[in-house]
Amino acid sequence: MSKSTDAQRGARASAKNWRGAAVAALVALPSAAFADDAPPPTITDQIPQLASVAAFKKQLADKGIGVAVNYIGDVFGNPSGGQKQGAAYDGRLELVLDADMEKLAGIKGGAIHANGYWITGGGLTSDYVGSLMPVTNTEAMVTVRLYELWYEQKFFDGKAAFRFGQLAADTEFLLSKYGALFVNGTFGWPAFTAANLPGGGPAYPLATPGVRLKLGSDSDPFTVLLALYNGDPAGKNCIGNPQKCNAYGTTFALDTSPLMMQEFQWRYNQDKDSKGLAGQIKIGAYEHFGDFNDERFDVNGLPIAFTGGDPGQLRGNWGIYGLWDQQILKLSDDGSKSVGFFARAMGAPDDRNLMSFYLEGGLNFAGLVPNRSDDVFGVAAAYGQISNAVRGYQFDAGIYPVQNYEAMIEVTYQAALMPGWTIQPDFQYIFHPGGNIADASGFPAKDAVVLGVRTSMAF
């Protein structure tokens, strides 16, 4: 069962309360997964000197083995605000392997997937800003780690699929097509789930054993996802940073109460010749079956700050969410020139969570710059409300400043240098870092201005 200690409670009230949650996100890079559509172009396909490498990859693909190498490099700094000022580099090299089991072994509908990371650099969020919403979705502990490793079997001509192995929820659940453009990690795996679930939940950089059932294919208008994961990717006995407890992604923990996730997806006007504007709506929920500490009251229902007693035990934890991706303007027949909107809202019980409400939204402008048809400009904002129970405990205990909310705005421009290679200048403004935590002087940390650039390469 997942239980937080008094030390962890104090950590939540301090400038380092974000450390208990894994930074998360979906990063929009191509993978080597086999799909009905042709794979996206890579740098290897564009450079004549790498033609032999491209040819070798094609030979492997023809035999049923897909290989991809992706790299992301981020350089970001906060010239003002946060806990202190500084700059940091984050790098992540990813190796992806996929096996088509029909080509390899005659098993129709079977597939094996594995990917892992070499993570380098420092952390602007952890070392300087102190926000709950991580500045970049690559930031993680420096290490080499396995991420996902699973087998999937499709049935009924792809209308149903069962997957088991080491899984990550952020590769399938809570995904926004338009939100994937943004660098801040909260637009992938939200700060809401990262802060509220043990170990940050099954999301980057921590996957965990699980099973998943998918009803419907990505080309169908309706899809249902059902998944069951080990409830803490760091394992039952982890104290401190979950990423250190599962440093290489090989813990394969099965010793904590499970986490169940469900999501219903509705897609409409997805065909290229559709007259209406494309969109998708997702409604989902999660439930954790472990025990959670009451954030304010002890076992006798009295304020913990006054009695110093053990926190009350609450059975289970849950959250609900809704997501909407909507094309609002289509300026070319193929949709390459368009404007898209996204929004996501989440809620959870007040008494056992750090964050009780979350809301985000944004706009994408694709292909609108003359002679830059593959470039995308975006602006987005996010807001996370600290729960009344956490605020009440801090008020009772005389902690200053009392946390209330964190919010941020991001403005970004993704420029395509060549197929498979982009560069992305980025600006973020973070209000109340950490939900209104103290800086080194003991006063509330000032709003943080964050500037940086990302480069993404697919080989």
Image: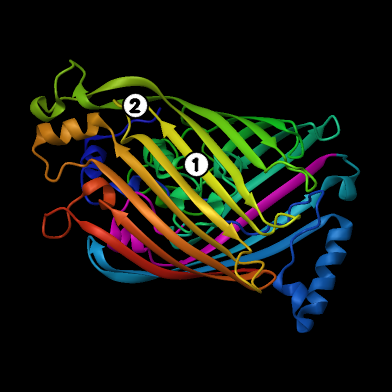
Query: Looking at the image, how many numbered discs can be counted on the residues?
Result: 2
Residue marked by disc 2: 292
Residue 177 appears at what percent x and percent y? 60, 48
In the image, residue 113 lies in the stretch drawn in magenta: yes
Can residue 403 be seen here? The reply is yes
Q: Secondary structure at mark 1?
A: strand
Q: Real-space Cα distance between discs 1 and 2? A: 29 Å
Residue 245 appears at what percent x and percent y? 42, 48
The answer to which image quadrant residue 277 occupies is top right
Give the side of residue 372 with respect to residue 449, left or right: right
Residue marked by disc 1: 343
Instruction: Name the kind of residue labelled 1 in the image.
Output: Ala
Q: Which residues are magenta?
A: 109-136
Q: Residue at (75%, 55%) from the top-left corner?
A: 334
Circle 2 packing at 10 Å, graded few (<14), some (14-19), many (20+), is many
Vertical placement of residue 286 versus 443, above or below: above
Vertical placement of residue 435 versus 365, above or below: above
Vertical placement of residue 338 versus 172, above or below: below
Instruction: Name the kind of residue labelled 2 in the image.
Output: Phe
Can residue 258 be seen here? The reply is no
Q: Residue at (84%, 62%) from the top-left corner?
A: 60
Residue 14 appears at what percent x and percent y? 21, 47
> Which of the pair 274/221 is nearer the observer?
274
Give the side of residue 260 with respect to residue 57, left or right: left
- The quarter of the image holding the C terminus is bottom right
On residue 364, the disc is: none
Vertical placement of residue 267 versus 65, above or below: above
Mark sitting earlier along the chain (1/2): 2
> Which of the pair 237/234 is nearer the observer?
234
Q: Residue at (40%, 37%) from the top-left corner?
A: 198
